Image (tube, rainbow, N blue to C red):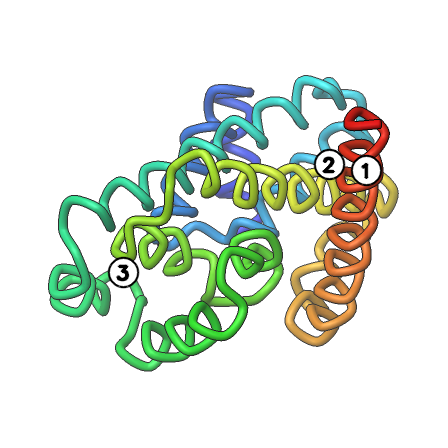
């Protein structure tokens, strides 16, 4: 996998990051966290710009999640049930994500990136349920920013040990969820406080 990523990133550069992220978010078999961490490793080696990598990763994740939403609007659940298994989106993953979505609503769009197997379905369900697009963007694009920043920065900091992230991403995903929850609550209180100050 490392050789494949090295070849793809070296050949296509920042455009390659965007393309890979769009495909991975939609559901193609692209190891998103591994890709982002490897990009961070390239930043560590001085072969890529940190800001350029963050921007490329964020654009790819945001576009990919938006395409998934539009597919949900246009095609609905039957399409996902029929063709999802071909790209490893099984009925079990669909039902699991649907239960989480019903319980947590739009907040799942924010933290879903950090839950293996969930980010590929959450945006699709948001489209199926006709969530307002601006509301969808607020939650999903914010989550994309935190997710991309986290893994590219980890790859940059870990250097040669970048591959360890993939090993522990599932095990420590609950801590990432708690981190996202904390950030989300802080932002929520900040926006409410700012709104009150404007009104007064």
Position of residue 8 relative to residue 143, above or below, is: above
Image coordinates for residue 75, horizontal then vertical, percent: 14, 51
Q: Which residue is mark 3?
A: 87
- Whether pointer 2 and pointer 3 mark residues with C-beta atoms closer than 8 Å, the reply is no
Label 1 to label 3: alpha-carbon separation: 30 Å
| Mark 2 to mark 3 CA distance (whole Å) | 26 Å
SS for dot 1: helix
Rendered location of residue 57, percent (x, y): 58, 31
In percent of the image, x 19 and y 63: which residue is there?
Answer: 77
Answer with mark 1 or mark 3, whichever residue precedes in sequence: 3
Quarter of the figure with the C terminus = top right
Label disc, if present, on residue 40 of the rendered structure? 2
Of label 1 and label 2, which has the lower sequence position? 2
As measured in the structure, the alpha-carbon distance from the residue carrying label 1 to the one carrying label 2 is: 4 Å
Binning the other alpha carbons within 10 Å of mark 3 as few (below 14), some (14 to 19) or many (20 upward) gives: few
Q: Is residue 118 left or right of residue 170?
A: left
| Residue 110 position (above or below residue 88) | above
At horizontal 57% and vertical 66% (from top left) the residue drawn is 115
Number of residues whose C-alpha sits closer than 10 Å to that of mark 1, classed few (under 14), some (14–19) or many (20 or more): many
Q: Is residue 91 above or below residue 54?
A: below
Give the vertical position of 151 relative to 83 (above or below): above
Residue carrying label 1: 156
Q: Of label 2 and label 3, which has the lower sequence position?
A: 2
Q: Quadrant of residue 74?
A: top left
Q: Nearer the viewer, residue 194 or 180?
A: 194
């Amino acid at each position: 996998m490392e050789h494949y990523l090295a070849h793809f990133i070296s050949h296509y550069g920042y455009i390659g990051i965007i393309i890979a992220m769009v495909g991975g978010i939609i559901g193609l078999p692209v190891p998103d966290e591994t890709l982002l961490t490897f990009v961070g490793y390239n930043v560590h080696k001085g072969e890529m710009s940190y800001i350029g990598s963050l921007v490329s990763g964020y654009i790819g994740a945001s576009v990919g999640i938006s395409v998934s939403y539009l597919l949900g609007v246009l095609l609905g659940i039957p399409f996902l049930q029929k063709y999802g298994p071909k790209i490893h989106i099984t009925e079990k993953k669909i039902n699991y994500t649907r239960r989480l979505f019903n319980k947590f609503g739009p907040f799942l769009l924010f933290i879903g990136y950090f839950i293996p197997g969930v980010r590929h379905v959450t945006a699709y369900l948001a489209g199926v349920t006709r969530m307002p697009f601006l509301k969808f963007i607020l939650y999903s694009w914010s989550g994309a920013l935190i997710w991309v920043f986290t893994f590219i920065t980890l790859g940059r900091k870990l250097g040669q040990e970048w591959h360890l992230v993939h090993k522990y991403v599932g095990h420590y995903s609950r801590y990432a969820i708690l981190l996202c929850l904390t950030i989300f609550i802080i932002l929520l209180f900040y926006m409410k406080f700012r709104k009150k100050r404007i009104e007064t």
